Image: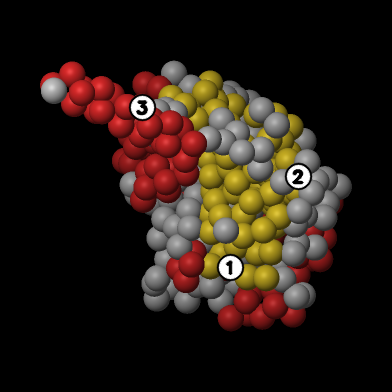
Amino acid sequence: MKSYKYIFLLAFMILGLIGLGNFYSPDTNLHLIACDVGQGDAILAIYKNTQVLIDGGPGEEILDCIGKHVPFWDREIELVVLTHPQVDHYGGLIEVFKRYKVDTFLANGLDSSASSYQVLKNAVGGNGSRVLSPIEGMALRVGMIYLDILAPNQSLLEAEAPNSPTNILGAFTSKRDPNDFSVVAILRLGQFDALLTGDISPQEIPEILAGGRMRDVEYIKVPHHGSKNGLTLDLLEASTPEMAVISVGKNNYGQPSEEIIRMLKDKGIKVSRTDELGDIEVVNDGSSFWTE
């Protein structure tokens, strides 16, 4: 009788593993998730078994988002991007680097005096990740996901950090707003383009547009949580997105601003907010996209 119990238990376990494998079986679509991390930013891009994480929010909420969308046995993230060293973008990355193997870390050399940023630098060093410094014109490919870097531009970096070593975290300091150095990139798969803006300052946007690398996109991550000190009409008209995502917490900071919401709606752009919807997942099959 015992042998039958063991056979039944073994069969149950096998069926469970098959079911779990089917549940996590990757499809051939790009999944772009604006993670609900409260008052912060985190975008997770998944294509098959490849993951790209842009920012990590302020705390450990990012681990919940990754856990929901990535199989528990996959402990490797191919690329992590930090747009700029402010805690609402890097705080959650500390635990990401402690718990996952990160192949490549893209982050400019601007330093932060915050003690938590020193903790992040130590975590990156302990992870053994390759560190790259972003600059306008850089193009990265991770599997079938492409990332075209539009900012920071070379003239800004040369003015603020002449002769600064590249590919080193915290290589230089600046009295300028860290948002001025924010990474801006277009993530592409097939015919789908997503403009990821970090917290780029409005005064840096003309330089980005003058660079000639902006193009029509389907999706925009609105800069600076929808603050009026972020998105400009020029950027919107140059990129012509169909959908805008605002990553924002339930707060009293006055974000997103009514002015920005009105600007988006006047252009007929669909607006989705993490404080209202939680995680916002956009699925793209290479030609069309939809929200799940």
Neighbor class of circle 1 (other Cα within 10 Å; few <14, some 14-19, many 20+) is some
Q: Position of residue 265 (x, y in %)?
A: 70, 78
Task: Of the two numbered discs 2 and 3 on the same chain, state the one appearing first in sequence.
Answer: 3
Which residue is drawn at the image coordinates 77% and 75% (left, top)?
Answer: 267
What amino acid type is highlighted by mark number 2? Gly
Q: Nearer the viewer, residue 189 or 72?
A: 72
Is 96 situated above or below 130?
below
Q: CA distance from mark 1 to mark 2?
A: 21 Å
Secondary structure category for the residue under label 2: loop
Q: Is residue 170 visible?
A: no
Is 237 situated above or below 64?
below
Q: Position of residue 79 (x, y in %)?
A: 56, 31
Q: Nearer the viewer, residue 81 or 84?
A: 81
Q: Which quarter of the figure is the N terminus placed in?
A: top left
What amino acid type is highlighted by mark number 3? Ile
Q: Nearer the viewer, mark 2 or mark 3?
A: 3
Which residue is drawn at the image coordinates 48% and 22% (left, top)?
Answer: 129
The residue to which callout 2 is attached is 286
Q: CA distance from mark 2 to mark 3?
A: 34 Å
Q: Which mark is residue 272?
A: 1
Image position of 285 (left or right of 15): right
Task: Of the two numbered discs 1 and 2 on the same chain, state the one appearing first in sequence.
Answer: 1
Task: Of the two numbered discs 1 and 3 on the same chain, state the one appearing first in sequence.
Answer: 3
Q: Is residue 53 visible?
A: yes
The residue to which callout 3 is attached is 14
